[in-house]
Image (cartoon, rainbow, N blue to C red):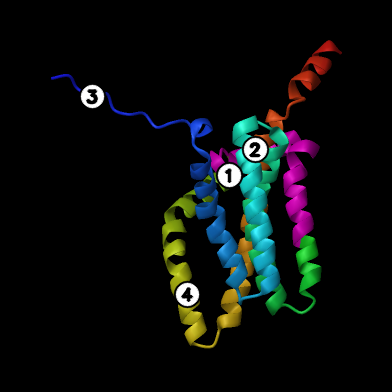
Amino acid sequence: MTKKKPKTPLPIEDWPLWKLVGLILISNGALAIMLTFIPYYHSTALIFGIILLVTGMISFIYTIRKKNWWAGVVFQNTWPLLFFAMGARSLISQLPNGWIWITLLLACYILAWLIPVLDPKLSALLWREQTAPETRLGKGYMGVFMKFSPTIIALGPISGIYLSRHGYYNVGVLIFGIFSCLISIVLGQLISHQIWPKRPWAQQEESETEGY
């Protein structure tokens, strides 16, 4: 008897449209639902979540089908922005003059995306220290993160339930808002560091630099 060759999964470029749509609905859709209901339901948050979800879906499909770099930038922005929007909603609901803090955090988010453009060496340092640290500080941070992150993830929902039952719901929302905004800023720098070197005009800039 001849053995059947195992089927190799299709590369994502060859996926049918319904699979690509389903992937975004599952990933970004979950974040859009959280944005709508955290810390409470709001119709504006629902609309914003739908806009980011549809934008992410269209840009993702265009990136896969057309290999368009700009579409990739738009897509990679959508899910960190969902985190940022969740954090912004939470902070605004708890802090007086919350818009001031959100403006500052938004400036940090934009700066995180611009670091690879403004200072590639600093961007490379930040990337290295967050993925494969070489300094003592980076190694210590990575060791603590790897050791305690499963515990933090497990205790997160439990802490939220505990704080709510004991009248500290506002504290839980505030902590969630801070961490969501920080996650979006860190993701912004990590994603931008990977995307920027792949810009279509990078080779032309390198050749011009070598010419001088």
User: Of residues 13 and 168, which is closer to you in this image?
Assistant: 13
> What is the number of callouts on the image?
4
Left or right: where 178 falls relative to 162: right
Q: Amino acid at mark 4?
A: Ser
Q: Amino acid at mark 3?
A: Lys
Q: CA distance from mark 2 to mark 3?
A: 35 Å
Q: CA distance from mark 1 to mark 4?
A: 26 Å
Q: Is residue 109 above or below residue 61?
A: below
Residue 212, numbered circle: none
The N terminus sits in image quarter: top left
Question: What secondary structure is marked by label 1?
Answer: helix
Residue 130, numbered circle: 1
Chain part drawn in magenta: 105-134
Q: Nearer the viewer, mark 2 or mark 4?
A: 2
Question: What secondary structure is marked by label 4?
Answer: helix
Residue at (49%, 87%) from the top-left corner?
A: 166
Left or right: where 2 falls relative to 127: left
Q: Nearer the viewer, mark 3 or mark 4?
A: 3
Residue 87 seen in the figure: no
User: Of residues 26 and 135, which is closer to you in this image?
Assistant: 26
Of callouts 1 and 3, the N-terminal one: 3
Q: Which residue is mark 3?
A: 4
Q: Which residue is mark 4?
A: 159
Q: Which residue is mark 2?
A: 62
Q: Amino acid at mark 2?
A: Tyr
Task: Give coordinates of residue 206: x percent, y percent.
Answer: 77, 19
Residue at (47%, 49%) from the top-left corner?
A: 143
Label 4 neighbour load within 10 Å: few <14, some 14-19, many 20+? some
Q: Nearer the viewer, mark 1 or mark 2?
A: 2
Q: Amino acid at mark 1?
A: Gln
- State if disc 2 and disc 1 touch (CB < 8 Å): no
